[in-house]
Image (cartoon, rainbow, N blue to C red):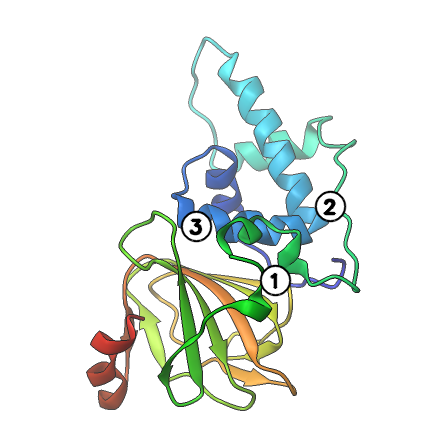
């Protein structure tokens, strides 16, 4: 999908390639990579470099940017074939996420958690129960302002949203840490559907959202 503008951090891709991500986060990254040729190639290069480094029997201290330099010079990944993308097919039917759905997003059983918001918890092991979920935000609805107690990975599957960081469209991924505070708002004429893996419950800034939080699970 060539118009994807926002991607996981390099460190996150490295953890995915090395198998250090839990199941929930890995599903989000793999789903993004299946749509993103650039991240597919980066993961393949990281896997190849990782294999080559394992063969080095004499460990030495590396500079902070050593891995990036190795990848830039490495002659690996040139023959990587990115997944084909068809605008006539809903992406979730081809993605790793499809293994976790009974059929497709069209048939997801949504649970309304607050006005304008619905969710569906996806069964995957992670930091805590319910760590992976699909969230649907109705057009024009703004999510309460919040920050995070830890990492949050958010992948746009349908629609789009805009927040303090910018605009996120289908295939874009927000790789956020505990320092980020934002207020996502669904834009466009259709609901924004996101696949989200969170390290911990969100830290809502408004009293009403904090009072509702135990009942909505975010």
Q: Secondary structure at mark 1?
A: loop
From the viewer's side, name the closer residue of 111 and 147: 111
Disc nearer the start of the sequence (1/3): 1
Residue 150 in the image, given as x and y percentages of width and height: 31, 59
Q: Residues within 10 Å of mark 3 (few under 14, many from 20)?
A: many
Q: Are marks 2 and 1 in contact (CB under 8 Å)?
A: no
Residue drawn at the location 32% of the way across and 60% of the way down: 130
Q: Name the residue located 64 percent from the left edge and 71 percent from the top edge.
A: 169
Disc 3: which residue: 25
CA gap, disc 2 and disc 1: 18 Å
Q: Name the spot of residue 218 as percent of width and height, x first.
A: 32, 71
Q: Identify residue for label 1.
A: 6
Q: Which quadrant of the structure image shows residue 112?
A: bottom left
Q: Residues within 10 Å of mark 1 (few under 14, many from 20)?
A: some
Q: Which residue is mark 2?
A: 83
Q: Nearer the observer, disc 1 or disc 3?
A: 3
For the point 43% across and 78% down, the residue is 118
Q: Nearer the viewer, mark 2 or mark 1?
A: 2
Vertical arrangement, residue 129 with respect to residue 73, above or below: below
Badge 2 or badge 1: first in the primary sequence: 1
Q: Which mark is residue 201?
A: none
The part of the image, by quadrant, that contains residue 48 is top right
| Residue pictured at 56% horizontal, 77% vertical | 192
Secondary structure state at the residue bearing disc 2 = loop
Judging from the image, what secondary structure is the residue with disc 3 in? helix
Give the mark nearest the N terminus, 3 or 2: 3
């Amino acid at each position: 999908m060539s118009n994807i503008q926002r991607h996981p951090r390099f460190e996150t891709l490295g953890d995915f390639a090395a198998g250090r991500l839990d199941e929930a986060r890995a599903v989000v990254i793999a789903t993004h990579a299946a749509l993103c040729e650039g991240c597919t190639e980066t993961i393949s290069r990281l896997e190849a470099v990782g294999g080559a480094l394992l063969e080095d029997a004499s460990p030495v201290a590396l500079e902070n940017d050593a891995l990036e330099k190795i990848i830039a010079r490495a002659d690996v990944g040139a023959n990587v074939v990115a997944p084909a993308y068809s605008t006539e097919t809903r992406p979730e039917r081809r993605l790793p996420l499809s293994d976790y759905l009974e059929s497709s997003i069209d048939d997801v059983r949504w649970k309304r958690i607050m006005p304008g918001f619905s969710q569906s918890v996806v069964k995957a092991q992670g930091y805590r129960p319910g760590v992976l979920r699909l969230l649907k935000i109705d057009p024009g609805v703004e999510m309460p302002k919040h920050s995070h107690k830890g990492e949050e990975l958010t992948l746009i599957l349908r629609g789009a949203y805009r927040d303090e960081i910018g605009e996120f469209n289908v295939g874009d991924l927000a790789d956020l840490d505990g320092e980020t505070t934002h207020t996502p708002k669904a834009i466009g004429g259709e609901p924004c559907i996101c696949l989200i893996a969170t390290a911990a419950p969100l830290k809502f800034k408004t009293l009403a959202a904090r009072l509702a939080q135990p009942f909505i699970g975010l």
